[in-house]
Image (tube, helix red, strand yellow):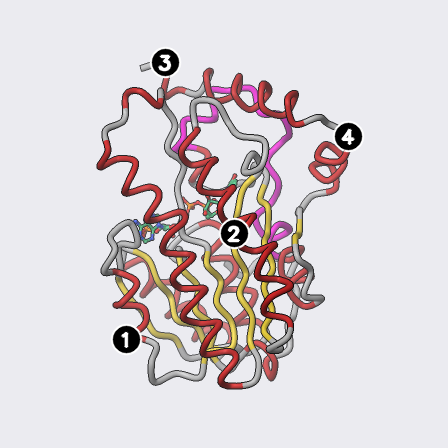
Amino acid sequence: MGESKMTTNVDKGRFGPWAVVTGASSGLGREFARQLAHSGINLVLVARRGDELEAVGVDLRRMYGVDYRVIVADLSRREAVDTVVSGTADLDVGLLVSNAGAGRPGNFLAFCSDDLTEIVQLNALSHTVLTNHFSKRFKARGGGATLLVSAMGGDSGIPYNAIAAATKGLINTLGKSLHAELKAFGVGITVVVVSPTETPIIDKMGLRAAPMPIKPMRVDQCVAEALEGLKRNRMMVLPGRLYRIMNALMPQSVMRSMTGRMMRRSSVFLS
Ligand SMILES: NC(=O)c1ccc[n+]([C@@H]2O[C@H](COP(=O)([O-])OP(=O)(O)OC[C@H]3O[C@@H](n4cnc5c(N)ncnc54)[C@H](OP(=O)(O)O)[C@@H]3O)[C@@H](O)[C@H]2O)c1
């Protein structure tokens, strides 16, 4: 943290004084926390690795003078959402960045029902329940917004990453539906559809070994573009010009076979 990075400032009066960021211990969530702290917003940092969250919080307090709170929660477990709800009850929260998530590369038929339940809970149900909870709070306080982090392939599908792609499809549909529904209450919601971005997830999914459809983008750029969309209460944001062009021109069938090839060649299948 600290060197020259793209940063989007947001209005602390509108999205603060506190923001909740799930998956704040690395990658996009960590960068969301940094850019929000740059605007003077206090952070609730949520993930499983408390020591990493603590290190992020200490850094943000030192660099930007913001306050932080760490909530350790495994969002692949149903009860974790209650931990986030009770851990934020006394704070005036103006923004939820619902970002925690993972891929689940592999042959669908090799998974058992526990694997599937876990990823659906993490990537879809936790986001849905947190969005419901915080949107009610935003309505009651007269404003606030949610940023839902989705993924390329959520609409087209991704062979060999089928269940994770399906959860992102749910996020897309949820966000699009709620964008109209919540507007009447002055409550915002924006879906950010992330294409390959330089975070640890690339290695976790074994994608270094695979041909990527586009070169992974910088994490600060991805987050800065997402926050620009949030400020404008855009329904969907697709960070990265190349990805926007690809998304506009490429039929979903081509996108599906391309991402399927990429997954098939991931190192997960080489071992
Ligand atoms: N980077 C990309 O290329 C890309 C592309 C498309 C979509 N996305 C989406 O972007 C979001 C962020 O991913 P990232 O790229 O930043 O990857 P990342 O660096 O692996 O970060 C994932 C974050 O989610 C947290 N997390 C994972 N499992 C969790 C669990 N069970 N409970 C609570 N927190 C959990 C991790 O923290 P702990 O391990 O400490 O729990 C970490 O903070 C995800 O939703 C991902 O699907 C990323």
SS for callout 2: strand
Residue type pointed to by label 2: Val
The residue wearing badge 1 is 86
Question: The residue tagged with tag 3: helix, strand or loop?
Answer: loop
Q: Is mark 4 within 8 Å of ligand 1?
A: no
Identify the element where label 1 is drawn. Answer: helix
Classify 10 Å Cα crowding around label 2: few (below 14), some (14-19), many (20 and above): many
Q: Earlier in the sequence, mark 3 or mark 2?
A: 2
Of the numbered discs in the image, which one, if any, rests on residue 249?
4
Q: What separation in Å lies between label 3 and label 2 (alpha carbons)?
A: 29 Å
Q: Position of residue 211 (x, y in %)?
A: 56, 19
Nearer to us: label 3 or label 2:
2
Q: Which residue is mark 2?
A: 149
- Magenta includes 217? yes
Mark 4 vs mark 3, foreground winner is 4
Provide residue 198's location: percent of width, then percent of height.
53, 40
Q: Name the element at disc 4.
A: helix
The residue at which mark 3 appears reads as: 270
Residue appearing at x 46%, y 37% in the figure: 166
* Mark 2 C-beta closer than 8 Å to ligand 1: yes
The CA span between labels 1 and 2 is: 23 Å
